[in-house]
């Protein structure tokens, strides 16, 4: 289970007719939503619930509670997952409890997609990063052809290989 605000902003943005960039800030911090009035406020008043809780935590908790409830009706569980946007195969629908929860979470909030999204947003591009990484990775002279090829991410530069041994501690 892994998610970002962008995941949920994309999901709710379509339903609410709001852009992702406008909805994302409302899903974090002091932003409260009233379901009946369909209005946002920056102060918590009666009938208003924090956006993060209402649109992110509560749906996740609902999926967990419903799927882990041994008394839950399997058809109701499948319907609830469909409502949240989780499409299950016929084979997936045969599972119950923890197994179904794992399948549902993998399909709904895949960790790999979120990790890749976070990497692309928060880490520098290879072209930018190589300018300072070369000094840590390359032990040869920093002004030779290979060092400059690494530093500039030069596709026409010489080919080099870095070998690292991972030692468990």
Image (tube, rainbow, N blue to C red):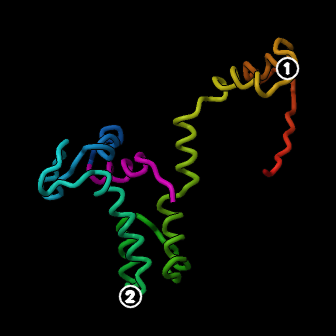
- Please identify the dominant SS of the magenta region: helix
Q: Residue at x 49, y 72 (%)?
A: 101
Residue at the top extreme of this rendering:
143
Vertical arrangement, residue 30 with respect to residue 106, above or below: above
The stretch in magenta equals: 1-16
Callout in the foreground (1, 2): 2
Say which residue appears at 85% left-offset and 20% top-offset. Answer: 146
- Total labels: the figure holds 2
Q: Residues within 10 Å of mark 1 (few under 14, many from 20)?
A: some
- Does the magenta-highlighted stretch encompass residue 161? no
Tell me if mark 2 has few (under 14), some (14-19) or many (20+) residues whose alpha carbon lies within 10 angstroms of its own.
few
Q: Position of residue 151 (x, y in %)?
A: 74, 20
Q: Is residue 28 left or right of residue 112?
A: left
Label ID, residue 77: none
Q: Whole-percent x and y of residue 49? A: 22, 55
Q: Residue furthest bottom?
A: 71
Q: Is residue 107 left or right of residue 76?
A: right
For the residue pair 91 and 103, the one nearer the viewer reads as 103
Residue position marked by numbered label 1 in the rendering:
146
| Location of residue 88 in the rendering, given as x and y in whole percent from the top left corner | 49, 72
Q: Residue 104 in the image: x percent, y percent?
A: 49, 69
Q: Quadrant of residue 37?
A: bottom left
- Name the quadrant containing residue 148: top right
Q: Residue at x 76, y 21 (%)?
A: 135
Position above or below: 147 against 13:
above
Which mark identifies residue 71? Answer: 2
Q: Under tag 2, what secondary structure?
A: loop
């Amino acid at each position: 289970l892994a998610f970002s605000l962008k995941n949920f902003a994309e999901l709710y943005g379509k339903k609410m007719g709001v852009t992702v960039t406008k909805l994302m800030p409302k899903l974090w911090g002091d932003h409260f939503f009233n379901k009946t009035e369909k209005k946002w406020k920056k102060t918590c008043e009666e009938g208003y619930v924090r956006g993060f809780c209402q649109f992110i935590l509560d749906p996740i908790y609902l999926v967990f509670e419903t799927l882990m409830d041994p008394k839950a009706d399997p058809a109701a569980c499948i319907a609830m997952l469909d409502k949240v946007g989780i499409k299950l195969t016929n084979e997936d629908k045969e599972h119950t409890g923890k197994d179904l929860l794992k399948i549902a979470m993998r399909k709904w909030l895949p960790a790999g997609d979120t990790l890749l999204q976070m990497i692309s947003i928060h880490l520098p591009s290879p072209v930018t990063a190589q300018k300072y990484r070369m000094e840590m990775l390359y032990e040869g002279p920093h002004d030779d052809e290979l060092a400059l090829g690494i530093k500039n991410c030069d596709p026409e530069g010489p080919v080099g290989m870095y070998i690292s041994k991972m030692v468990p501690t």
